[in-house]
Image (cartoon, coloured by chain):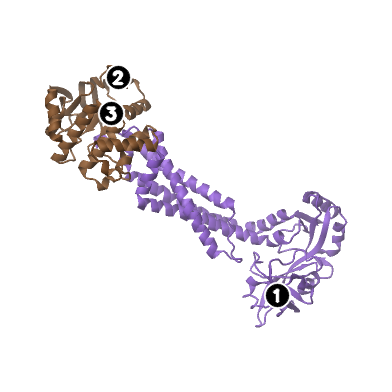
Chain colours: A purple, B brown
Amino acid sequence: MGWIAVKTLVADRGKLATALVGLVFSLVLVNVQGGLFLGLLGKASLLVDRAGADIWVGHKAMHNVDFPHAIPSRWVARLRSLPGVQRAEPYTIGWATMTLPSGGFEPVVVVGSDPASLLGSAWNIREGSPGALRHNDGIVVDECDDHKLEHPAVGDLREIGGRKARVVAKSRGIVGFLISPYVFTTLDRAAEYLRLPHGVCSYYLVQVKPGFSVDEVSQAIRHRTPQLDVYARHEYARISIQFWMTRTGLGISFGAATLLGLAVGLVMVAQTLYASVLDRLGEFGTLKALGAEEWQVYQILFTQALALAGGGSLIGLVAVAAIRHWFHSYRAPIVIPLWLSLGSCLLLLAIALVSSLLPYLRVRRLDPVMVLQG
Amino acid sequence: MKANLPPVAVHNVHKTYRRGGIATPVLQGVNLVVGHGRCAVLTGPSGSGKSTLLSILGTMLSPDQGSVRIAGHDLGRLDAAARTRLRRELIGFVFQRFELLRGLSALDNVAVPLALRRMPQRAAQKRAAEALAAVGLADKLHSHPRHLSAGQCQRVALARALAGEPELILADEPTASLDEQHGLELMGLLRRLTAEQGRTAVIVTHDPRILRFADVVYRLAHGRLETAERPRASLISAAEEVLT
């Protein structure tokens, strides 16, 4: 029966194209909207994901990596003495203003890391050397912020918080959730730029010794420093993402747009399948007159829905790949994991199957005797 | 088929339609027996109940009263699913307006009833090709209905009815959409193939030109059947005459 379904579906090219457009539209919308959403979420936890720390320790009620509260730097020694801690370093994040050559200024997020280990410093360096941060006044900026920072080259000078800053290296793709550029430097210099009081930092970044579990070490740190919050990397990433999700309504707006796309796809496919069946009602009557059973009739509609979903998924995924290829950037990353693509294909299948039920209900009421009695 | 039982046996069948509270009796005590290999033609004025009787024989409609046996199966004892199965397995249909599936080629159209019997596609198409060759359309296997003439479409429909080797062929005004020449050709073909294969046929028609192909002609009037037998020799010669 499958071949009958497919051949009759393909024969009506106009309706086939309309249904496919609906399905492809749905799939592209789900993937691109979802991909942009995930890309944005990834930016919200970028530092946490890429700093190289297994555990983040910070002020009580810390809720977003970019908005920390100061904690005493000296407490880091309590962590270093714990079994299971391979390395624990203070880490500073704060807001300052960079003065630009034109006389303008730009708010920046200053990130200061330990000069010896450079734990949590810039990655994906394209020009200069990350080790050059140890030189006087050294900072690392990102290529993606060139326009905002008036195209600084390696060796160029800027001013942050009234202090001199020299670009010693440039990274590519370190673009946070906020519009302000990240500027990486050392702990002491960050404290200067941020005009922090002596002996404070934002976090302790902890790396766990091989053979120890992150949970176990986290528990030990909590026990040792009960005044502080302690989170495994993935936990703090989730908390940072949650901050933006709940405070901005981001999830709702992306979700609403995606649902709208799905609804449009559903309506288009349902309407097309229904119209196609209405157009061929007589043929379904003929099939019943020739002895088709109810399940065989549904099998035809089901197979057509399946074929539409398959074709729509295939074309849609190609379109998504093309859109991602042309529009993905560090500033607006489109992150499409396999589960999103597979999930959207399954969603498409569900749309197609639901859409096939409506015409089936119409065909089910069809009396084959209509073929003989006009 | 149950041994020695006639393919069609109708006894005292009544059927009344009710619309808007008004009862219109269509069949009133119809009796009909068509033996193996016989070709019966039902004729009569519009509204005389020909299509209703054909629908009952085709298991698509149930009588209000009386019994109907198709190839020995008492339809009154069968549920809807069993009647559908019987229709699929034992009956071949030729409809007035061909009722071919537009999206399918002639070959695929003829293969449809075989596919409904769950025959694999390749085997169904092989048998469909043979059926199309038998009706003289071996060169039109891959043509779609829109590219075929009315006469060719009706021959495809005839091939579809015969491909499943049914016990009974039911034809509803098979020549109504055809001109005289094509109508006679189709009837000649239908008569020859049913005779060769030993099939029984019941044909409903208004067309007096095709009465000569019948073994027996029944006239329906006021819901009752009147019989007019014809000698077999004359119809065989009629078929040969048209086909030559």
Between the residue at mark 1 and the residue at mark 3, the CA separation in whole angstroms equals: 88 Å
Measured in 3D between alpha carbons, the distance from the residue under mark 1 to the one under mark 2, in whole angstroms, is: 97 Å
Residue A362: image quadrant is: top left
Q: Residues within 10 Å of mark 1 (few under 14, many from 20)?
A: some
Picture coordinates of residue A187 (x, y %)?
79, 69
Mark 1 or mark 3, which is nearer to you? 3
Q: The residue tagged with tag 2: helix, strand or loop? A: loop
Position of residue A193 relative to residue A264, above or below, is: below
Would residue A293 be visible to someone looking at this image? yes
Task: Measure the alpha-carbon separation of dots 3 and 2.
Answer: 14 Å
Do tag 1 and tag 3 residues touch (Cβ < 8 Å)?
A: no
Q: Residue furthest top?
A: B4
User: Residue A48: horizontal and vertical position, in percent?
Assistant: 71, 60
Q: Quadrant of the N terminus of chain B?
A: top left
Q: Is residue A248 visible?
A: no
Report the residue marked by disc 2: B72
Depth order, front residue of A272/A192: A272
- Disc 1 marks which amino acid? Thr
* Chain ID at mark 1: A
- Give the SS element for disc 3: loop
Q: Quadrant of residue A4?
A: top left
Q: Which residue was labeled with disc 1?
A: A97
Residue B22 x/y as whole percent: 23, 30
How many neighbours does mark 2 have within 10 angstroms: few (below 14), some (14-19), or many (20 or more)?
Answer: some
Q: Which residue is mark 3?
A: B58
The one of A238 and B134 positioned closer to us in this rendering: B134
Q: Is disc 1 in the same subunit as disc 2?
A: no
Point out residue A173 in the picture as x, y percentages from the top left corner. 64, 67
